[in-house]
Image (tube, helix red, strand yellow):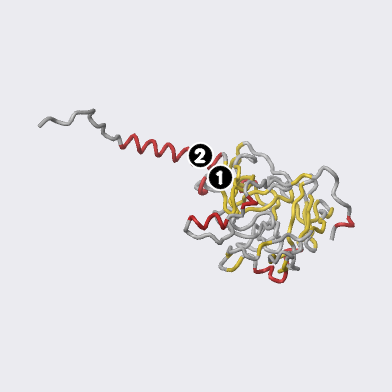
Amino acid sequence: MEPISGQPSERVNWLHEAGGLVAMLLAVLAFHSLIAKPFYIPSGSMMPNLLVGDRLIVSKYPYGWSWVSASFHVVPRSARRVMASTPEYGDIVIVTPPYANEDWIKRVVALPGDTIAVRRGQIILNGSPVPQEVEPPVQLDTDDSQFCDGRPCLEAYERFRVRLPSGREVYEPPTWRETLPNGASYLVIDHLNQPLDNMDEIAVPSGHVFVMGDNRDHSADSREMRPGHGLGGPVPLADVGGRAEFITFSLDGSESWNPLSWWSGLRTERAWSSLRPVIRTAPPPGPESTR
């Protein structure tokens, strides 16, 4: 019987293949650590500007690199930074709390050298109240299916439930527009009188920033000084891991493992939304519009 003709099969070089996979993995980790990484919003601390279920991109290079830049926080904590720079007022940044290797997302409201206090929910920056204008309430979908710590993320707003003329039901919590000294302007939600609404004046040390969540009554941030509960004051810039840039897509929690359900769960209007604050070129309104 004649042997089957043809080219002899080449043996797979498994060592070469494994080396290629390792190189690809290292390239992904380097990009994740040095350039940008995806981020998922697991809590409502940044509502109304970020919703639970938002997926976004965080750039890693705007403020330089430090221990927190490395993927999965595999590098020991350190105060050293490479090519360091300082955030601007209003930047949304990811920070790592002093007691856990996890990423939180907050907004920069005070820079190194500033003094900051909070009185009845209003920021006092370098002795001057940060303007807060009353805005039409944001509309949060009552059909949102996201859960936070085992409870519906939006249940705190049940008393703000309203029915629109269309028949759709939404939550409309009290909403304010805050404008920082550089003109960075964004919405905040503030609907409770609670301990974090008041904080004595402190100075932000060199190499630190003061950060807060936009959902002022539901954010553990720099105002929260209790150990293990918040950020315990100003955050070292070495613990700031990057700047939030834009939303890629968002899911409302109604989706399941079935890919066919993903489309119905998409919040299509949120895709590709920029997360950089609006910069006002005109001065914000005077004291009569503040609370």
Given the image, on which type of amino acid does mark 1 rest? Lys
Residue under pointer 1: 37
Residue 194 against residue 263 in the figure, above or below: below
- Give the image location of residue 245, x and y in percent: 64, 44
Point out the residue furthest to the bottom here: 159
**222 lies left or right of 129:** left
Q: How many marks?
A: 2
**14 lies left or right of 160:** left
Residue 20 against residue 58 in the figure, above or below: above
Q: Residues within 10 Å of mark 2 (few under 14, many from 20)?
A: some
In-front residue for pair 146/255: 255
Which numbered marker is on residue 30?
Answer: 2
Given the image, on which type of amino acid does mark 2 rest? Ala
Quadrant containing the C terminus in the rendered view: bottom right
Point out the residue furthest to the front here: 166
Q: Residue at x 57, y 39 (%)?
A: 35
**Front disc: 1 or 2:** 1
Disc on the earlier residue, 1 or 2: 2
Q: Residue at x 73, y 51 (%)?
A: 109
In-front residue for pair 178/61: 178
Q: Residues within 10 Å of mark 1 (few under 14, many from 20)?
A: some
